[in-house]
């Protein structure tokens, strides 16, 4: 096995040791300057490219295993690396290096009547445990964002992507070493033993400060149910496109096809199309034809099937399903209120979009929809930290505490108060 971390026979002791080493590394990271962290990120990107052959060979092993396990096409797409995708991973590291370093940034400053000068400044969370499944690029994205924000990372990849993750993590650690940073700032759990996740969820003796799960519903639900430390995560990306009565038909076609089919396996892919009843007869057949011509299977409610009889009948389960495949459920709704009611019932707080030329309707949708990301006349596939100018992301948070939407470097910090006095005592 590669040298990212040595898994002993005593998993509990090994995990505690990883936590202790990560804690020591996090203290070192927080002391380094922003320029030093930038140089380390660039060294990691260069090391990743230098290790391309090893990483692609490891990925080929994972793809063979995935095929043998019968992974779906969407999951195989998530798992696959190519030279071009690896270039994109390295470029994402460089993009993170270009980001303003959040550590020490002053959020607010004021003086109170006692004369105390009070500043609120950003500070690292500390040690972040990231648990993810079949996307090997998450190894690099997560490590980069943690480093940019002064945090150490303990990474646990899924069994499907383990060999790719090991090769990537080894390259990242080589880059850290070259830059004079502690290699233990990035550690990867090198076992498929599920008990490793359980150990991480306990906090490894108080050394893990936050857990970030990135993966399917089962993984995230387990983490949220069992974790003894705070969790930043999303349960599902059940994203909706609402085509309003005042939508432009061509925009509706282009956006819906892109939102569903650009990449079906990502959490920002649209899963349900909501069609305003007022224009359903005029618009839905054309939108449906474009989707079907592009290879999408449609499942509709009774009203949708009147207009496009050849599609499958949708069930209650369809409105609750994140397909991650070329399947889209379709429902005809009574205007904006009907769309808002459906999203409130079935949405998961990830990404919702409206297509309309009516500014007032769009603004009400943006204000009233409860989600981390709400869009107007844009594809839900833009639900991505890189597309938001954040360099990269660990995931899209759908909770209501600390971070929501794309979780980038800034969202991996907390704050503290710096209080400067001139000798004040409190009466």
Image: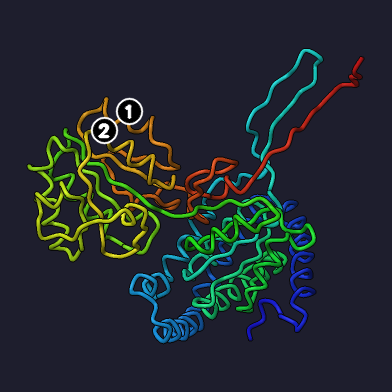
Q: Are marks 1 and 2 in contact (CB under 8 Å)?
A: yes
Residue depicted at 45% across the width and 42% down the height: 372
Describe the colour scheme in one phrase.
Answer: rainbow
Is residue 118 toward the left or the right of residue 413 in the image?
right
Residue depicted at 68% across the width and 61% down the height: 201
Mark nearer the N terminus (1 vs 2): 2
Q: What number of labels is visible?
A: 2
Circle 1 SS class: helix
Is residue 62 toward the left or the right of residue 179 in the image?
left
Packing grade of label 2 (10 A; few <14, some 14-19, many >=20) is many
Distance, label 1 to label 2, CA atoms, is 9 Å
Q: Is residue 402 in view from this perspective?
A: yes
Tell me the number on the disc at residue 125: none
Most extreme residue toward the top is: 113
For residue 163, above or below residue 206:
below
Q: Position of residue 377 (x, y in %)?
A: 26, 40
Q: Position of residue 401 (x, y in %)?
A: 59, 41
Q: Position of residue 232 (x, y in %)?
A: 58, 51
Residue depicted at 66% across the width and 69% down the height: 187
Circle 2 SS class: helix
User: Which of 104 and 241 lies nearest the eye of the viewer?
Assistant: 241
Tell me the number on the disc at residue 336: 2
For residue 424, above or below residue 187:
above
**Quarter of the rendering occupied by the N terminus:** bottom right
Q: Position of residue 10 (x, y in %)?
A: 77, 80
- Nearest-to-viewer mark from 1 and 2: 2
Tell me the number on the disc at residue 364: 1
């Amino acid at each position: 096995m590669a040298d990212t971390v040595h898994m002993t026979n005593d998993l509990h002791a090994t995990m505690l040791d990883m936590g202790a080493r990560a804690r020591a590394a996090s203290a070192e990271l927080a002391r380094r300057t922003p320029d030093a962290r930038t140089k380390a990120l660039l060294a990691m990107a260069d090391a990743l490219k230098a290790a391309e052959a090893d990483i692609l060979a490891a990925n080929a092993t994972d793809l063979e295993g995935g095929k043998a396990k019968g992974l779906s096409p969407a999951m195989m797409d998530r798992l696959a690396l190519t030279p071009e995708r690896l270039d994109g991973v390295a470029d994402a590291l460089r993009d993170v290096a270009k980001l303003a370093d959040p550590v020490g940034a002053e959020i607010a400053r004021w003086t109170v009547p006692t004369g105390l000068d009070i500043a609120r400044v950003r500070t690292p969370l500390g040690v972040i445990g990231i648990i993810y499944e079949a996307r090997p690029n998450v190894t690099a994205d997560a490590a980069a964002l943690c480093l940019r924000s002064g945090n150490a990372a303990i990474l646990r990849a899924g069994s499907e992507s383990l060999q790719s993750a090991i090769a990537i993590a080894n390259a990242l650690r080589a880059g850290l070493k070259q830059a004079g940073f502690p290699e233990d700032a990035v550690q990867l759990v090198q076992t498929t033993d599920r008990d490793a996740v359980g150990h991480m969820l306990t906090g490894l003796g108080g050394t893990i400060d936050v857990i970030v799960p990135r993966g399917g519903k089962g993984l995230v639900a387990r983490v949220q149910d069992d974790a003894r430390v705070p969790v930043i995560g999303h349960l599902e990306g059940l994203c909706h496109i609402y085509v309003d009565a005042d939508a432009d038909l061509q925009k509706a076609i282009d956006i819906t096809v892109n939102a569903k089919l650009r990449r079906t396996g990502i959490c920002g892919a649209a899963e349900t199309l909501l069609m305003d009843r007022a224009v359903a007869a005029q618009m839905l057949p054309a939108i449906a034809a474009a989707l079907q011509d592009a290879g999408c299977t449609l499942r509709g409610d009774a009203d949708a099937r009147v207009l496009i009889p050849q599609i499958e009948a949708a069930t209650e389960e369809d409105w609750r399903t994140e397909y991650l495949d070329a399947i889209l459920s379709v429902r005809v709704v009574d205007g904006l209120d009907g769309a808002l009611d459906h999203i409130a019932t079935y949405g998961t707080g990830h990404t919702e979009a409206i297509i309309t030329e009516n500014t007032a309707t769009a603004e009400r949708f943006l204000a009233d929809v409860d989600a981390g990301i709400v869009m107007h006349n844009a594809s839900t596939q833009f639900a991505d930290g890189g597309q938001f100018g954040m360099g990269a992301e660990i995931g899209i948070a759908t909770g209501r505490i600390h971070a929501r939407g794309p979780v980038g470097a800034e969202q991996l910090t907390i704050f503290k108060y710096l209080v400067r006095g001139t000798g004040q005592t409190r009466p």
